[in-house]
Structures are given as C-alpha cells and as structure tokens.
Image: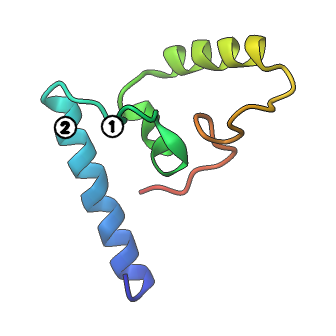
Amino acid sequence: PENKKQFNTAQIIYRQFLCTGIHFGGTISAEHGIGKKKSCYLPLMFGSGSISEMKNIKNALDPDNLFCRGNIFPESCSVV
C-alpha cells in the first residue's frame, strides 16, 4: 500500500477473504500454523472460550513463554 488509507482498505478486504474461507469450511491457517500475521484473526475461527483454553494449554506446556512468542497469541492486535 502507498498510504494508510490503502492499507486499511487492504485489511478490510483481507478480513472479508478470511471470513469467506471460514464460511465455506476452510481455515485461516495452513501446515505452518497461524503465525504472527494471522494470529489476530484467530477469533474469527474460534470463540473466546476456545482461545482461553488454548492459552491455558500453552501456559501449562510453556510457563516461561519461551516457545514461539507471539505466534499464536499476540500481545496486541490492530486489525480492522
């Protein structure tokens, strides 16, 4: 994108693309997992309860948050 407006428009289109894929039974991740670029969109596929359970499992297996920091559960999201 050449400017902030184009970036915001691209984010809106990208979100619509992801929602369409989910609607037709797809996922927003592939063989390499969700990753940093798509982690903010995880709530589109799973409810807050499921995400909370995932966080609990991650914390139990990695209490010091050493593995893949920020790949699944970002500290903050700025998606449209």
Question: Relative to 72, does residue 40 appear above or below in the rendering?
Answer: below
The alpha-carbon separation of the residues under discs 1 and 2 comes to 7 Å
Q: Which quarter of the figure has residue 24?
A: top left
The residue positioned 36% from the left and 27% from the top of the image is: 45
Q: Are marks 1 and 2 in contact (CB under 8 Å)?
A: yes
Amino acid on which the number 2 mark rests in the picture: Gly
Q: Which quarter of the figure has residue 64?
A: top right
Where does residue 58 sit, x and y in percent of width and height?
Answer: 68, 18
Q: Residues within 10 Å of mark 2 (few under 14, many from 20)?
A: few
Question: Relative to 8, does residue 79 appear above or below in the rendering?
Answer: above
Q: Secondary structure at mark 2?
A: helix
Residue that lies at the very extreme toward the bottom in this rendered image: 2
Which numbered disc covers residue 38?
Answer: none
Where does residue 48 sit, x and y in percent of width and height?
Answer: 51, 22
Question: Relative to 16, does residue 55 appear above or below in the rendering?
Answer: above
Question: Relative to 48, does residue 34 appear above or below in the rendering?
Answer: below
Q: Which residue is mark 1?
A: 28
The residue positioned 39% from the left and 74% from the top of the image is: 7
Left or right of 37, for residue 77: right
The quadrant in which the C terminus is found is: bottom left
Of residue 47 and residue 61, the one placed in the foreground of this image is 61
Amino acid on which the number 1 mark rests in the picture: Ile
The quadrant in which the N terminus is found is: bottom left
Of residue 46 and residue 72, the one placed in the foreground of this image is 72
Among numbered discs 1 and 2, the one appearing first in the sequence: 2
Q: Which color scheme did the rendering employ for the protein? A: rainbow
